[in-house]
């Protein structure tokens, strides 16, 4: 953590840290540096008259700065706790946002609540506890509860919505916690964590294995349960929209699997259409839209990103929006105006690039679909996953509870193209030798990540420009991860 800045002579180090961290609304860095020259080195020095002594500060701005300082008192109180514990004052903004206006009191009651912030580790929280709690104990139940939450939050950054309870217990033991079971119970009783019973074994004579218990943060566990419940609801309440004759009327140019997917969409409450690039998913969706428009059925098209929505609109010649816009996202609150109380009007909802749906967005989408809605999720589970936790498309495919059509015939790439052959093989779990006389695909071996990085630089700056006669600026480098997380698609 960054040490608090040295205060001006005779000044208050908490005040200096508060100002230097940019936590005083409306006070820029340049003006903050000028405060000591105006005799403002502690909270008691802050008055509108003193602030007017600053360069470029008139009466009106001085009064605004004075008011904003008073309004920031809850954040200032948090800064005082952090600085006295040797922690970075910049954490105060996140603490205030997470814990609310009485954040300082809540930290005094439970210093390990600091672990609720991204980027804070257990060492930081322990330092705060030592500063605030006389005789702070590593076996404190609050500490154990916080370690449970931290372990689950860390897992969400890797895409996991739940963890086996045994892994959480192991994390507690690794931190020297003597009674992991008590810590788990405390976390569950706090309401922050949900405990999920082990699945029922296939053999009815066997008892569930308690070792298969799992834990989740409440928000993600509830989202998982909402997805499951609403998928079941839509499957039960949906009625067929069109008969086989209608499906055949738009099946010209479709193969058997694509035509089957059209029919599946119009009969099942939730259905999935998957397949690799170039297998005709978009053509199939266009046929669904064509048929629904003929019947006068209301259909809504959406995708997780604006670019994907625009592409879907171009391919179907029907309006498409982002999923957030479809649901009426409410600013930064994270809520949606479209929900169970004000559901969507469409009888059929189609979501493309569904691999990018995380579990909370999927739960919100399903809750906004009224009984009888037909939902078609289109995507490739081998593509980049969602930014938020949850592998919804892949999990639904694996569940076996909804009908799935997988398209395997490649149409978009030239038959026999090296890229097409290699992509299809990798998708099936194989890595065959590359035969590409036209050098459409070139495999460059490397013994490790360091050598791979050097080879990429050499290829981009020298080999490829010489071979193709193009400048290095015309070369695009694509990676599966960026700074340890899946790289965004572009």
Image: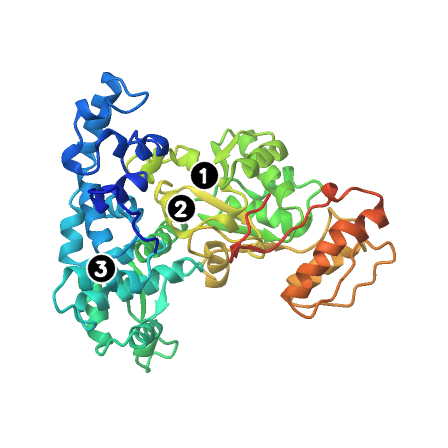
Q: Is any atom of residue 478 visible in this view?
A: yes
Q: In terms of image quadrants, where is residue 253?
A: top right
Q: Residue, x 33% and y 52% (percent of image)?
A: 226
Q: Nearer the viewer, residue 287 or 381?
A: 381
Q: Residue, x 81% and y 47% (percent of image)?
A: 465
Label 3 vs 1, first from the N-terminus: 3
Q: Of all residues shown, which one is farthest toward the right?
A: 437
**Residue wearing tag 3:** 128
Marks 1 and 2 close (CB-CB < 8 Å): yes
Image quarter of the C terminus: top right
Q: Of all residues shown, which one is farthest toward the top?
A: 59
Q: Is residue 429 above or below residue 358?
A: below
Using the numbered discs, state the Cα–Cα distance from disc 1 to disc 2 in whole angstroms.
8 Å
Secondary structure of residue under mark 3: helix
Q: Identify the image's colour scheme: rainbow, by chain, secondary structure or one colour.
A: rainbow
The answer to whether residue 426 is left or right of residue 29 is right
Q: Residue, x 49% and y 32% (percent of image)?
A: 297
Q: Which mark is residue 323?
A: 1
**Residue wearing tag 2:** 361
Secondary structure of residue under mark 1: helix
Q: In terms of image quadrants, where is residue 336?
A: top left
Disc number lying in front (2 or 3): 3
């Amino acid at each position: 953590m960054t040490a608090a800045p040295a205060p001006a002579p005779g000044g208050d180090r908490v005040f200096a840290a508060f100002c230097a961290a940019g936590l005083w609304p409306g006070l820029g860095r340049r003006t903050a540096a000028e405060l000591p020259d105006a005799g403002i080195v502690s909270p008691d020095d802050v008055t509108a008259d003193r602030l007017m002594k600053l360069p470029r500060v008139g009466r009106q701005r001085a009064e605004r700065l004075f008011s904003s300082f008073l309004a920031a008192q809850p954040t200032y109180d948090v800064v005082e706790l952090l600085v006295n514990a040797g922690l970075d004052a910049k954490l105060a903004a996140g603490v205030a946002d997470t814990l609310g206006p009485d954040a300082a009191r809540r930290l005094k009651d439970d210093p390990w609540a600091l672990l609720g912030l991204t980027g804070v580790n257990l060492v930081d929280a322990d330092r705060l506890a030592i500063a605030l709690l006389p005789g702070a104990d590593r076996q404190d139940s609050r500490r154990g509860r916080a370690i449970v939450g931290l372990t689950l939050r860390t897992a969400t950054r890797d895409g996991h919505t739940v963890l086996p309870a045994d892994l959480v217990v192991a994390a507690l033991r690794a931190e020297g916690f003597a009674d992991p079971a008590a810590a788990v119970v405390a976390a569950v009783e706090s309401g922050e964590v949900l405990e999920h019973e082990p699945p029922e074994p296939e053999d009815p004579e066997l008892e569930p294995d308690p070792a298969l218990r799992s834990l989740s943060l409440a928000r993600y566990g509830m989202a998982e349960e909402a997805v499951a419940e609403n998928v079941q609801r839509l499957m039960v309440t949906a009625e067929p929209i069109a008969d086989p004759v209608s499906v055949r009327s738009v099946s010209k140019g479709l193969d058997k699997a694509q035509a089957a997917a059209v029919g599946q969409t119009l009969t099942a409450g939730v259905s999935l259409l998957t397949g690799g690039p170039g297998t005709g998913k978009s053509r199939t969706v266009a046929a669904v839209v064509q048929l629904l428009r003929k019947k006068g059925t209301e259909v809504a098209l959406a995708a997780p990103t604006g670019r994907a929505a625009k592409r879907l609109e171009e391919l179907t010649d029907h309006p498409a929006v982002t999923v957030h816009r479809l649901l009426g996202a409410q600013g930064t609150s994270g809520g949606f105006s479209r929900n169970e109380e004000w559901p969507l009007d469409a009888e059929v909802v189609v979501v493309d690039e569904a691999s990018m749906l995380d579990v909370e967005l999927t739960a919100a989408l399903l809750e906004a679909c009224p009984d009888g809605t037909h939902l078609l999720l289109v995507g490739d589970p081998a593509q980049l996953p969602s930014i938020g936790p949850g592998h919804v498309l892949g999990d639904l495919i694996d569940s076996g509870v909804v009908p799935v059509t997988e398209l395997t015939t490649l149409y978009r790439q030239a038959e026999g193209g090296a890229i097409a052959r290699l992509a299809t093989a990798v998708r099936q779990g194989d890595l065959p030798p590359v035969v590409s006389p036209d050098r459409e695909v070139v495999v460059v071996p490397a013994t490790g990540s360091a050598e791979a990085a050097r080879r990429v630089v050499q290829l981009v700056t020298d080999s490829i420009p010489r071979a193709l006669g193009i400048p290095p600026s015309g070369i695009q480098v694509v990676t599966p991860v960026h700074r340890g997380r899946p790289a965004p698609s572009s």
